[in-house]
Image (cartoon, coloured by chain):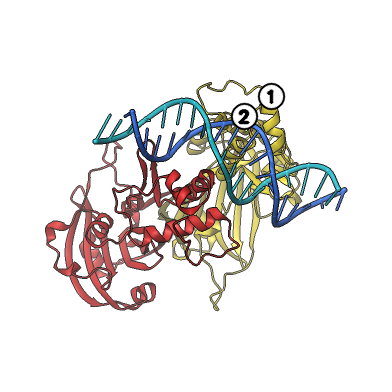
Chain colours: A yellow, B red, C cyan, D blue
Amino acid sequence: MAHRIPSADERLPAYARLRDALASRIASGEWGPNHPIPSEARLAREYGISIGTVRKAVDGLVAEGLLERRQGSGTYLRRPSFDATLFRFFQVRGPDGAPSSIPTSELILRARTKAPKEAEAALGTDDVIGIIRLRSLSDEPVLFEELYIRADRFAGFESLPDSAFGPLLYPLYFDRFGVLVKRATDDLSFGRADEQVAARLKLKPGDPLAIIRRTAFDIDGTPVEWRIARGSAAQFHYRSEIG
Amino acid sequence: MAHRIPSADERLPAYARLRDALASRIASGEWGPNHPIPSEARLAREYGISIGTVRKAVDGLVAEGLLERRQGSGTYLRRPSFDATLFRFFQVRGPDGAPSSIPTSELILRARTKAPKEAEAALGTDDVIGIIRLRSLSDEPVLFEELYIRADRFAGFESLPDSAFGPLLYPLYFDRFGVLVKRATDDLSFGRADEQVAARLKLKPGDPLAIIRRTAFDIDGTPVEWRIARGSAAQFHYRSEIG
DNA sequence: GAGTGGTCTAGACCACCCG
DNA sequence: GGGTGGTCTAGACCACTCG
């Protein structure tokens, strides 16, 4: 009975209170990426509830994608590994129909700046770091991306060495800044290329574009990144499963 | 211990075997839409396992969307009510920003026919009933739809009275033909309008189109419907949540 | 072999729904 | 009031991981 469950509505069931308590301990960064959270038996002892109830709380967090069980080893933070790549919107296949090669990323610009209106509205601040990237598959440009991340969460991002960047940003956010992107919303629409975008993507001005606007949220619900990505509509292809 | 759990791998855990057994009893139509399945206590007795294990099995089916618990009443089949409307891909808002009115549907054609190649590939048969609809919001045409459903699952569909049709087909499938659409895959891409589609949607030939191809599956995994829907790309808007 | 999560038991009491 | 699902207990044994 060591842990007080903080500020939880007393009427909530025990498993819900433990789930919330664990979520806030996770959000506070108490456990690193490869350090297991306390065992179920231990949590049961510490919170004075039974193991079955602890399991139900942990089940909830696992279902939410925050935790990951490893049998025989422990329960760990899940690395921010959900398939959030924007390439899922673009099907580029070789002549044999096989999925094409590994995406690459060319960093065009990175600087502390004032957010454009749309990004400011999404992030709730205009103090941001702006990033412009061109992303390619098999040396063919596919996506032109403009990103803004909150300066208060990513202090020093501008001065990271280029070598720190891989094709994916979210692992970098996590490893260097402790920002765990938990969810994102992608907004898809359709438009036409202006001169700048056309030049970057090797299209003609006026060519049809798929436009994706994304807002990504931290584990505590704070919006930490806003981006707009543009790619040729001709290459656009998206599969959505429902049910 | 009344029920034999049919042909289940003996090595599977008890909850998994019960889950599969219940799924196949559901698929066989043993319980109607407003008839509860046996209570948890009863299932525990009949299958010779404990209530906690029954709950875990039922939890799985609830998570899959097959069942729905109603506290104090029982556990029921979930009506096929997932939001599968293709209008979710098209944002049509009034000048005040409010979502626009109720979708309407104009039935243009309905006949037993031979499926086109793509539909045959998806359905595994070319013996189908074809349906062509034009769907509108606020009297403005938004979607031009071409559907094919398996003739063996929808015997007599051609001769339903027009009055049987509402804007949504899946409730009709369920109520009249016992076909419960459990999941579907939507494939989105962009293309250009041909003369026929342009005329129906009040566009110009060559105008950009959003094209959605859907395959819908029965509860037992059989593909029962394939459709292709086209709408103006300018109105296309889709929001996807990930995480 | 010690510790972890995975499965399972055989109950209990509660909140809720409905006839 | 009787039956239902919702929560919870206090254990058990197993399969797995890792030092």
User: Which mark is in front, 1 or 2?
Assistant: 1
The Cα–Cα distance between marks 1 and 2, rounded to whole angstroms, is: 10 Å
* Residue drawn at x 27%, y 67% as measured from the top left: B146
- B207 left or right, relative to A241: left
- B112 left or right, relative to A182: left
- Residue type beneath disc 2: Ala
Chain that bears disc 2: A
Q: Name the residue under label 2.
A: A21
Secondary structure under tag 1 reads loop
* Residue drawn at x 66%, y 21% as measured from the top left: A4
Badges 1 and 2, same chain: yes
- A89 left or right, relative to A25: left
Tell which circle, 1 or 2, labels the residue nearer the N-terminal end: 1
Picture coordinates of residue A212 (x, y %)? Answer: 48, 51
Q: Nearer the viewer, residue C7 or A120?
A: C7
Q: Nearer the viewer, residue A192 or B105?
A: B105
In the drawing, what numbered circle is on residue A135?
A: none
Picture coordinates of residue A215 (x, y %)? Answer: 52, 42
- Residue type beneath disc 1: His
Picture coordinates of residue B147 (x, y %)? Answer: 27, 67
Q: Is residue B202 visible?
A: no
Secondary structure under tag 2 reads helix
Q: In the rendered image, which quarter is residue A193 located in?
A: bottom left
Q: In this view, does B69 lie above or below B1?
A: above
Please give the count of numbered marks on the rendered protein: 2
Using a 10 Å C-alpha cutoff, classify the residue at mark 2 as few (fewer than 14 neighbours), some (14 to 19) or many (20 or more).
some
Q: In this view, does C12 lie above or below B81?
A: above
- B92 left or right, relative to A201: left
Whether the residues at callouts 1 and 2 have beta carbons within 8 Å, the answer is: yes
Q: Mark 1 points at which residue?
A: A3
Q: Is residue B189 above or below residue A146?
A: below
Chain that bears disc 1: A
